[in-house]
Image (spheres, rainbow, N blue to C red):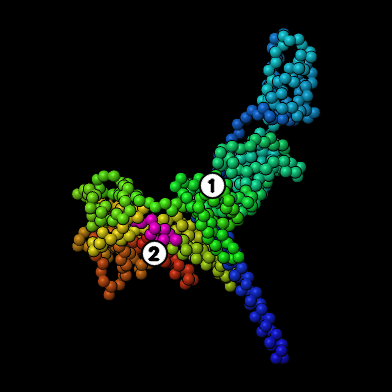
Amino acid sequence: MRYIIILIILMKTLFSLDVVLDVNESSEYNKNSKRISDKSKQYFGENLFSGNFKNNREFKYNPNYIVNINDKLSVKMWGVHDYLDDNLTVDKQGNIFIPEVGVVHLLGVRADEVQQIIEDSVKDVFNDNVHVYADVKQYQVISIFVSGSVKNAGLYNGLSTDSILQFIDKAGGIISGEGSYRDIEILRNHVVVKKIDLYNFLVTGDVESFQFRASDVILVKPVDSFISVLGDVVRPYFFELSHENSTVQEVMHYILPKPTINNFIITSWVNRREVTKEYPLEQASSVYLKKGDSIKFYSNYYIENIEVTIEGEHIGTNHISVSKGTTLYDILSKVDFTPLSDIENIHFYRKKVADMQQKLLDSKLNALESKILTRDASTKEEAEIYKSESEQISTFIKRARAVKQKGQVILRLKNNLKKIVLENNDRISIPKKNNIVLIQGEVAVPNALAYDSNMKFSNYIDFCGGFTEDADLDRILLIKANGRVLKYNKGMFNKELYVDAGDSILVLQKVRTKNMLIFKDLTQILYQIAVGAAVILQL
């Protein structure tokens, strides 16, 4: 019995170990997968198919077109014999019939050869005094299968000379992140007769002409590999590699790096570890990329001057270039203010701070999204509740991702502005003197009220009809004119907050969920968006 118990314990231990290994492998896979399926970045070409191609039904003459059954021709003869027919149809045997001339075989003839063949047939009957004009008037409508990684695979009608872009657009376009823009095949009788790479069209505007036949198949293959591109480039997208040995130089043809770049960093996954390596731009032709890599282009030149934006109530230019080391005091001491400039509440924004705030917000949104997708329900009723709640939170997450953090650095009168050294792309905003108090969020009537020095915080709430049932009374914010945030708690023992001209009151929404982890995340996200972006986002 003792040995049996030991054996059972060992089996449970081994089983637990297998589970841990599976979770770790899954976690590693999810990390790698997430880097490629990041919803915040677009895939190159994903906006190509938006309906602009499918509605084009214009007949286009193609000299290389091969005449087919049911095509329409226009034939005119004049001279000693007159004849006109604008609707001659190529019959099932590939012929047209011209009175007094007879049968003319045109099946398989190129469009630019039709005129000569009909002329030769006419001359066999008449002399040289008969002149001929012939033209392909209309191609037959054919049906083409569009299959693979498209939104609506199916059978679509069109002309044999229609572009592959038109047929794919009729099928709803390529599924973003799933279908390939570089590996598209046209099959005829189960044989590949043409391969298409749409990156050529996206970059140069060129698309290869091809004459379709009835029952041809356009197959959009699944994408094999993506890389992520960011940094100082015009197109910071996900890009598809055309083959396994693609170099950085080849990719640069599509991404349009900015002229100032001189370095790039490649981040790869090697043996389940993230490895980063830096290269000079001169090595772009000898450095190879592989599936899942992330490449960032940047410049490490020493910049002597930086660009600073000055906006708001002042006289003078909005964009200035100053030398490195310039302080906020240096700039403000030279600004030409107006009588309406509120110099006590100047706003100062830094891109680095905004990026940090955005990353923190994205991290919280990702964590929240993970939690709602992995919840387990014990009953059918609970599953329905979770489903409904998850859909609502997913919609909220989508809207929250669109909110951009401002990156404000709060300035106070006691700040030593001589110690705040400016950085590139810093933004200084000089507000206009404002005698308005803005009340937003969960109050009966959100409004803007004239400032009254005799009114307290609660008075402004009362003037807007009081709180709604959805108001979170533990998270009521007073945003001062300089950007400072104070928290107000409604209660008889709480200290009253005093409102100044130009302040804003934000009443956040109450989070209603039984899941405490989700409640905590939603509350923090609502608070961060309100503070970092001064936006009230509704659940």
Q: Mark 2 or mark 1: which comes first in sequence? A: 1
Q: Is residue 55 above or below residue 132?
A: below
Marks 2/1: CA–CA distance:
41 Å
Q: Amino acid at mark 2?
A: Tyr
Which structural element holds mark 2?
A: helix
Residue located 52% across and 52% down the image: 229
Residue 417 falls inside the magenta stretch: no
Most foreground residue, 385 or 438: 438
Q: Amino acid at mark 1?
A: Met
**Part of the protein shown in magenta:** 347-359
Q: Is residue 241 above or below residue 138?
A: below
Residue position marked by numbered label 2 in the rendering: 527
**Residues at marks 2 and 1 touching, judged by CB atoms closer than 8 Å:** no
- Horizontal and vertical percent position of residue 18: 65, 74
Most foreground residue, 499 or 11: 11
Which structural element holds mark 1?
A: helix
Q: Characterize the local packing of mark 2: few (<14), some (14-19) or many (20 or more) Cα atoms within 10 angstroms.
A: many
Most foreground residue, 280 or 118: 280
Residue position marked by numbered label 1 in the rendering: 252
> How many discs mark residues in the rendered view?
2
Residue located 79% across and 21% down the image: 103
Residue 387 occupies quadrant: bottom right
Residue located 69% across and 88% down the image: 5
Residue located 42% across and 67% down the image: 523
Residue 83 occupies quadrant: top right
Is residue 192 visible from the viewing direction of this image?
Answer: yes
